[in-house]
Image: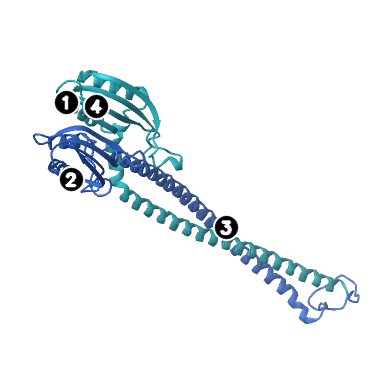
Amino acid sequence: MNNKHIACVLIVFLCVCIFEGVSMIRQRATAMQSEAQAARRDATTAEMTLRTQQAQLQDLKSKTADLIAYLNAWEPALSRFTTPESGELNIGAMIKQADLILLAQRFEVASNKTDTSVPSGVATIPQVVRAHLTIEDDFIKSINWFGQIETQLPCSRISDLSITRGQAGSDIRMDLVVDIPLATAPPTAP
Amino acid sequence: MKIDRRIVDDLKTERPDVTPALAPYLRLVPILFYSILAGGIVLSLFFLFVLKNAASSRETWKAEIARHKQDLSNVQTARTAVEKQSRRASDIVAWVEGSRCLEPLVAAIVRSMEPGSNIIELGLTRDPSSPTQIKLTLKLSTQGSKQLDTTLERITKMNFRTYNPNQTQSRGEIDYEATLIYQNPRNVATSTPPPATPQHP
C-alpha cells in the first residue's frame, strides 16, 4: 500500500466520520421531535383534564347555588354568637327585658352531637351554649317571650319545653332548655 | 502522473514516477469526499434547524402543561372551597330543620282548648340524635276524647304528623304521648330560594 492508497483510506475515513456526525445530529433531532410530540400529548391531556374539572366545578356551583345562597342568608345570624358568654348575655338580657320571674337558670357549654361534619374533622357547629331556664309568670307574657326568643334568635333551638300550671291563677311554670349554636368561622369564598 | 513535455517546460530532470498511478475507479474517492462534505453540511444544517424547532416546540408545550397544571390546581382549590361551603350549608340546614319554632305549635295546642278542658301539663322534647322529631307529652283535664281530637287536628294543620301515639284515659284526665315530625311542604334547601332574612322554614 503506497501513500496514495493511504490518502484514499484517510479520505474514506473522513467521509465515514462526516456521515456519523450527520447521523448523530439527525438522531438528536428525531429524539427532540419525539420529546416535543410527547409534551404536546401531555399538554392536550392536561387541557382535557382541566376542561373536565372546570365543567365539574361549574356543575357543582350550579347544583349548590341554592344551598350556598341559603348559607349566606343564615351566616350573619349564625356568626352572631362566637363565645359562650355572648350567648349567655343575650338570653339574660332578653329575660330582663321581658321582666319575667326567673326561678332558676343554668348555662353550660355542650358538644353538638348532631353535627354531620364531625367525622371529617371540620365541625360547623361543634358546640352549643345550653341554657336551662325555669320561669314562672303570666301565661301570655311567658308564651310571648318564648316566641320572642325563637324570632330574635333564629338559630336558637328549644330542645326541651315543659309547661305546667303556676302558683297563681293565670301563671304558668315553664321549664325550657335553649341551645344557642357556637359556629366555627366560615370558610373563605371561592 | 505523467506531464506532456510539449505543454510544460519543466526544469526538473527526468525521473521515474515515485509511486505507480492509482486505479481509475479511485478517482471517485475525492468526488465522494466533496459530495459527502457538501451533503453533510446541508443535512447537518437541516437537522440542526429541526432540532432547534423541536426544542422550542417542546419548551412551548411544557410551558402549556405548567399553565394547565396551575389552572387545574386553582380549579381544585375552588372546588374544595365550594365543597366546604356546601358541607357547612348542609350542616346549617340540618340545624335549622331541627330548630323549628315551637311557639306556634304551643299556641295552637293552647288555643285548641274548649270550655271545660284544661292543660295540666304540656311537654315538647326534641330527640337529641334527631332534633326534627319532637316528643309531645300532653296531660289534659277533659271529659271524653273530643278535646284530644280537636287538639290533634290543630297539630295536623300545623303540618306536624303524629307517630307512635300512646293514650291513657282515667278519671277525666287524658295522658297523650306521640312523636311529632314536621312535614315540610317545600324543600327549602334544594328547590326554593332562601329567605332574604333568616327565618325558620
Q: CA distance from mark 1 to mark 4?
A: 9 Å
Query: Mark 2: which secondary structure?
Result: helix
Q: CA distance from mark 1 to mark 2?
A: 24 Å
Q: Name the residue carrying label 3.
A: B52
Q: Tell me the amino acid under the disc marked 3.
A: Lys
Q: Name the residue carrying label 1.
A: A139
Q: How is the image coloured?
A: by chain
Split into 4 quadrants, where in the image is the C terminus of chain B? Answer: top left
Give the residue at the far bottom of this rendering: B24
B83 vs B34, left or right, is left
Image spot of residue A90 (x, y percent): 29, 23
| Chain to which the residue tagged by mark 3 belongs | B
Image spot of residue A111 (x, y percent): 41, 33
- The residue nearer to you, when weighing B47 against A180, is A180
Query: Mark 3: which secondary structure?
Result: helix
In the picture, one chain is blue; tell me its letter: B
Q: Residues within 10 Å of mark 3 (few under 14, many from 20)?
A: some
Q: CA distance from mark 3 to mark 2?
A: 82 Å
Q: CA distance from mark 3 to mark 1?
A: 91 Å
Query: Which numbered dot is residue A174?
Result: 4
Chain A's colour is cyan
Q: Which marked residue is nearer to the observer: mark 3 or mark 2?
A: 2
- Quadrant assignment, res B34: bottom right
Q: Are marks 3 and 2 in contact (CB under 8 Å)?
A: no
| Chain to which the residue tagged by mark 4 belongs | A
B4 vs A56, left or right, is right
B17 vs A131, left or right, is right
Image spot of residue B9 (x, y percent): 82, 73
User: Can residue A83 be seen from the camera position used here?
Assistant: no
- The residue nearer to you, when weighing A174 against B171, is B171
Q: Tell me the amino acid under the disc marked 4.
A: Met
Q: Name the residue carrying label 2.
A: B156
